[in-house]
Image: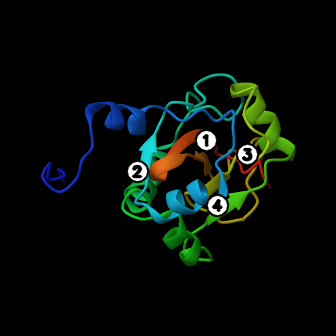
Amino acid sequence: MKLDQNCIDIQQDDLATINRPDSLRQCLDIDDAKLSMDLPIVVKYDYIDLQKTDYNFMQEFHQKDTQEYFAKMKKISSSTINNLKSQAGKDFHFYRSGLNGNVRKAVKKIMPKADDDLIVYHVGLYECPSKQACRQTDERSPRVYFALGNYGHIYILFFDPYHELNP
């Protein structure tokens, strides 16, 4: 959808600022976080882990992983964080992850200067039948982790096929 230039005064510099990757070195203030959680999500890949951790997106994807990833991204990209949080539960695995433990270690590997109050969420793609994901047996319950930015932007970070980051 294109904005009507007669109804709103947004300059080219404003659009460049809005679309510039957020600096995840400083936390969102409360008002910016609230606004971002109420705006439609825009998926961004500026900080995606491509090889720095065991949870990078260069690892093997099974066909089901890929199919479920795009199914979830379609649902996520047409919603807001607050709508997704209200749907979180048995049917839709969408939760905020504390920035501690394995999540913190992984974030610091890809962004050493990331703010300690970075807002991170994860979405489950599917659950393995045993509910016990295991790297050795390749039983998967994959999760995708992302950080919240301004203006509804989310920054995809990690692919955790064995549910190890936040077990």
Q: Earlier in the sequence, mark 3 or mark 2?
A: 2
Q: Which residue position is annotated with label 2?
A: 70
Q: Nearer the viewer, mark 1 or mark 3?
A: 1
Q: Secondary structure at mark 2?
A: helix
Q: Mark 1 and mark 4: span between their CA atoms?
A: 16 Å
What's the amino acid at mark 1?
Answer: Phe
Q: CA distance from mark 3 to mark 2?
A: 25 Å
Q: Where is residue 126, by image quadrant?
A: bottom right
Instruction: First in sequence, mark 2 or 1: give its number.
Output: 2
Cα gap from disc 3 to disc 4, whole angstroms? 11 Å
Residue at image coords 74%, 38%: 115
Name the amino acid, label 3.
Thr
- SS at mark 3 in the image: loop
- State whether residue 121 is above or below residue 108: below
* Residue hosting label 3: 137
Left or right of 58 in this view: 131: right
Return the x and y of residue 51 as percentages of the image width and height. 63, 22
- Residue topped by disc 1: 159
Position of the C terminus by quadrant: bottom right
Disc 1 on helix, strand or loop?
strand
